[in-house]
Image (cartoon, rainbow, N blue to C red):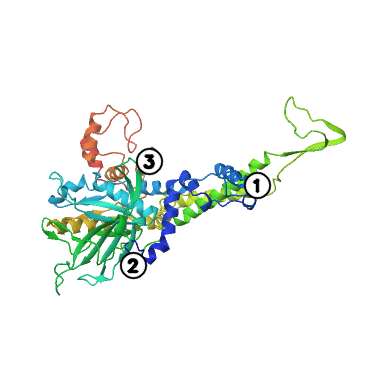
Amino acid sequence: MAVDSHHPQYDEFAPYWVKLRDTYAGSDKVKSRRLTYLPATSGMIQDGMQSTTDRGYKAYQSYLLRAVFHDYVADAVKIAIGAMYCKPPTIELPEQMEPLRNAATANGETLDMLLRRINEQQLVTGRLVLLMDNPSVPDPSRPLPYFVIYNAETLINWDDGDRDASNMPRLNLAVFCETSLERQSDFSWQNVEKYRVLILGAPAENEAPGVPAVARMALVERGSVKDATEETVELKTLMYKGRTLTELPCRIINARDVVSDPDYPPLNGLADIALASYRGEADYRQNLFMQAQDTLVTVGSSEDDHRVGAGAAINLKHGGEAYYIGVSADGLSEMAKALSADKAEAAHRAGQLIDNRARPFESGEALKVRQSGQSATLTEIAIAGAFGLETMLKQMARWIGADETKVVVKPNLDFSLTGMISQELVELMSARAMGAPISLKTIHTLMEERGLTRLSLEDELKEMAKDPPIQMGTDAGGDADAPKTPGQAGNDSTGA
């Protein structure tokens, strides 16, 4: 088998990745797929779809143009990413790796930005590969290795048949398709077939028993692709300042785990609804168009061509008739109801990853349970993404001789956090005034968590002392004209 061979699971999951990638890209991408997502009607097929001059082809072009695709998948990803990053992740590094914090990729992206892109790919296709690469020409100002994200579609082959010291499966083969457009000497662009091969095994020059396996890499391109095999590709041992790697410098990250087997994309159901709504919109708008285009019928007319509208006349013989016939509106209301149902379901799914709005008569405990259930998938995605990045940072630490125990990546898991609104604060203060056992310190802590203030309680009280007296009701029914001093307020803050 050649280097461009596919893993069996790749061929099984690739259609899902293409579908999610297209629906995430939006209307233009979906419409560019034409018949893949919007089949032609039987009448269009009967009228011919082979040539641009065929009646069926022209009718399909109008059908496609009128169709509306809603960006439910893109909206869902934006909602989820916004919830995941309402608070920043916690990333700790050993001193030698601190430069990565502000430049973790070849494009100079920060570690926070890298983690955000990891989560985006988890949401879209449910799979990516994080690869650690060493610059071929090291930059003295940026001597550390850097990270590269490979989309799910680029990892075409893999094998995790090996076992590590803990008897856990580990990758011993990873093949990435890096085929891309390259400019030629005549200024034209050509698609150049390229593959990156990573293999874990004993170096070719030292295959004696007991020699630890090391990571090796090869780049295969152009005419050598079809003839390349594991034995013939030119593998080079990956090294950093004389240190080799005893594991492949890449980590597969799925939506919910970091194993080799692919996950189904978490938004696959939403993509199906979006495409169903797209086809329904096409039919609905086609029917609306047809109803507005009634056909004129004349009986007893001697003319072959008729004009209608202001200033036009139709000459008929004695006893002749002229009337319009059109498409029946029967079923149109049902189509509209079906589309509304699809839109409601899609909107629900787009926002159900995180929905922190309380329902009428819903207890706090019920709200907590509902939020916990709805954010379960998002929690799994955040944990898997952070774990994948953490393990790769630890691998880099081992490679460069840093302390891997100092590497920590903790994602934000509080997706229900929303800013405190004034009404909530008024209700809290009113409850306190009526005797509820809640202190100013507790209320201030809630204000900090909700982003209403960045000051500590002590600093807030100092700032309050600088403010002019407030001529309105006081905290707990005291004299409005006798505001408390900072010391008195401080004593009050230590209440129950």
Q: Residue furthest front?
A: 186
Task: Give the x, y percent position of residue 388.
Answer: 27, 58
Amino acid type at mark 3: Ser
Asked if one can make out residue 360 in the rendered structure from this viewpoint, the answer is no
Task: Give the x, y percent position of residue 306.
Answer: 75, 32
Q: Residue furthest bottom?
A: 209
Q: Which residue is mark 2?
A: 1
Q: What is the CA distance from the residue labelled 1 to the residue labelled 2?
A: 56 Å
- Residue at 22% x, 48% y is 104
Task: Pick whichever of labels 1 and 2 is earlier in the sequence.
Answer: 2
Asked if one can make out residue 371 in the rendered structure from this viewpoint, the answer is yes
Query: How many other residues sit within 10 Å of disc 2, few (<14), some (14-19) or many (≥20)?
Result: few
Is the residue 483 above or below the residue 191 in the image? above
Amino acid type at mark 1: Ser
- Residue at 42% x, 63% y is 12
Q: Are marks 1 and 2 in contact (CB under 8 Å)?
A: no
Task: Pick whichever of labels 3 and 2 is earlier in the sequence.
Answer: 2
Is the residue 418 above or below the residue 1 in the image? above
Task: Give the x, y percent position of residue 339.
Answer: 57, 49
State the mark number for residue 430.
3
State the mark number for residue 333.
1
